Image: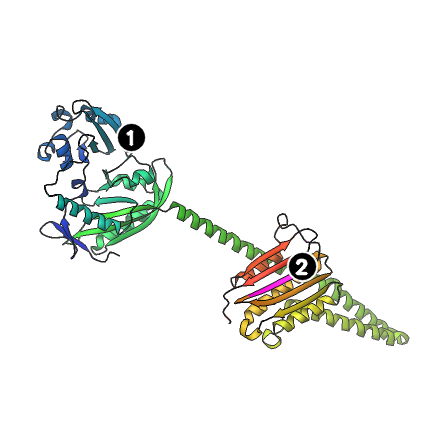
């Protein structure tokens, strides 16, 4: 982690207390020839590699018109740059053979506004030895790359903040984003124009705030970057800001990383989570509506009719003393039945106090109530589980609800003769199995119902995994595994 601020000393060197190298830009340390021209062809910059390759000194080149004054010593193909820079804001690339020098020239050009930037190398002088001190040259490059590799090794760049120019180092931007640019200086405007319009203002505003602090060392931001084919990549851009003694930001060395796959995956996972949450919410609301509908039907079609019969018998008893005893007896029987139905509805909605009754007794009571009116025979077995030690009260309640939900599904849909609930402990896992010998189902075809969604949502509260096993005519098995539980 970089935790020291680089400053430019009065001697003109970059220092951070432990390292030291001359404060020259990367364009002066790399072997590509590099120069910039204005719209009239006047040279604005000429690096040392350009001096070595062409034999033209920077002092002679800068301020001179390239098209007029160097026709005899610079390959004539370079004078056709206008043909390769017609598309403003897009880099151009070409290779040409210069017979006079018996060499191939590899040229990258960029035209933005009134400036043309040119980076070139030649086959007969691929590595010009322009440094008088190779050890110092190696030290400079090592120091530069040390700072860059502390950030990343994807698409490396150096930004001259005073000149508003960015140097794309090596071939990262070509490899990742498709631009035919390698070791070339580009105007800051090109980079800005590559930022997605929806991200541009945010990125630039935040970046300028970093520069104006005079103390912030690391800048980092995520945004969408336009590739050469016009599509956009999600990128993470990070840079190390270099200041002078007056706390003015001079340069920034950094790297751009393509994180498109990561962002797409994160967005996909977020969408899946949202979809799942919607399903759970819909299942909960549907279950509530179904429960209300059942209760409404019970009240209206059953209990209300029973109360009407009770009222009718009481009226007969009051009007006819001879039938009074019989009618009152019927009213008493109907009233008892009504009370039992109300209690049954209550039990289906409200679980008896887990703390008082316990999970196992509640499941036994549930099975007893389900077995009475149905030919279905349901049994329950628990093994190696201590209710108080292994199961918290909330988990007991949710296990009860899962059992209740699944048994109701079996009673309504399975057409089974037998069902079994098996709850046991295996190592640190609590496992719930509910099986029946009913008609089964094709899990590849059957749409997931509200019941199973409710079961899964309850299980997932504890990191539970729900598995269904079934085939047509072969019954059904529901398995829920609770792992790494913390007793509440």
Query: Residue at point 40% right, 46% down?
Result: 261
330 over 144 or under it: above or below: below
Q: What is the secondary structure assignment of the residue under circle 1? A: loop
* Disc number for residue 383: none
Q: Nearer the viewer, residue 143 or 306?
A: 143
358 over 62 or under it: above or below: below
- Residue behind mark 2: 409
Residue 482's x, y, as percent? 54, 64
Residue 195's x, y, as percent? 32, 42
Query: Residue at point 32% right, 45% down?
Result: 200
Q: Nearer the viewer, residue 449 or 155?
A: 155
- Residue behind mark 1: 87
Could you tell me which quadrant the N terminus lies in? Answer: bottom left
User: Is 461 included in the stretch rendered in magenta?
Assistant: no
Query: Residue at point 22% right, 55% down?
Result: 213
> Which residue reaches farthest top?
99
Q: Nearer the viewer, mark 2 or mark 1?
A: 2
């Amino acid at each position: 982690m970089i935790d020291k601020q680089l400053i430019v000393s009065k001697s003109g060197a970059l220092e951070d207390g432990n390292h030291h190298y001359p404060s020259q830009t990367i364009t002066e340390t790399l072997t590509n020839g590099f120069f910039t021209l204005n719209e009239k062809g006047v040279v604005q910059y000429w690096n040392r590699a350009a001096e070595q390759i062409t034999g033209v000194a920077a002092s002679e080149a800068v301020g001179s018109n390239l098209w007029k004054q160097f026709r005899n010593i610079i390959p004539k193909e370079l004078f056709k740059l206008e043909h390769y820079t017609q598309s403003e804001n897009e880099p151009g690339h070409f290779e040409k053979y210069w017979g006079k020098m018996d060499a191939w020239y590899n040229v990258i050009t960029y035209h933005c506004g009134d400036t043309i930037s040119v980076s070139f190398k030649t086959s007969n002088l691929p590595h010009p030895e322009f440094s008088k001190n190779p050890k110092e040259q190696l030290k400079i490059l090592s120091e530069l790359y040390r700072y860059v590799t502390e950030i990343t090794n994807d698409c490396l760049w150096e930004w001259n903040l005073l000149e508003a120019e960015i140097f794309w180092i090596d071939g990262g931007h070509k490899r990742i984003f498709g631009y035919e640019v390698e070791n070339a200086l580009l105007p800051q405007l090109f980079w800005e124009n590559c930022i997605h319009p929806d991200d541009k203002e945010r990125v630039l505003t935040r970046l300028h705030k970093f520069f104006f602090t005079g103390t912030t060392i690391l800048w980092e931001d995520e945004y969408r970057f336009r590739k050469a084919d016009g599509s956009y990549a999600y990128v993470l851009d990070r840079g190390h800001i270099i200041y002078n003694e007056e706390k003015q930001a001079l340069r920034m060395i950094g790297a751009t990383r393509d994180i498109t796959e990561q962002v797409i995956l994160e967005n996909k996972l977020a969408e899946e989570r949202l979809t799942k949450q919607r399903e759970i919410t819909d299942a909960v609301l549907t279950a509530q509506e179904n429960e209300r509908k059942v209760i409404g039907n019970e009240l209206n079609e059953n209990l209300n009719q029973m109360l009407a019969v009770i009222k009718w018998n009481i009226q007969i008893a009051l009007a006819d003393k001879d039938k009074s005893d019989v009618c009152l007896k019927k009213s008493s029987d109907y009233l008892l039945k009504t009370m039992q139905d109300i209690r049954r509805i209550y039990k289906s909605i409200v679980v008896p106090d887990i703390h008082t009754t316990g999970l196992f007794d509640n499941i036994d009571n549930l099975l007893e109530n389900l077995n009475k009116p149905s030919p279905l025979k349901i049994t329950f077995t628990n093994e190696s589980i201590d209710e108080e030690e292994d199961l918290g009260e909330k988990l007991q309640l949710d296990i009860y609800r899962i059992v209740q939900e699944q048994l109701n599904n079996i009673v309504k849909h399975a057409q089974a003769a037998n069902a079994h609930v098996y709850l046991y402990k295996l190592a640190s896992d609590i496992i719930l199995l509910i099986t029946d010998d009913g008609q089964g189902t094709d899990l590849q075809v059957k749409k997931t119902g509200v019941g199973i969604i409710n079961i899964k949502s309850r299980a997932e509260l504890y990191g539970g995994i729900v598995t269904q096993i079934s085939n047509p005519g072969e019954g059904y098995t529901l398995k829920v595994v609770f792992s790494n539980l913390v007793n509440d």
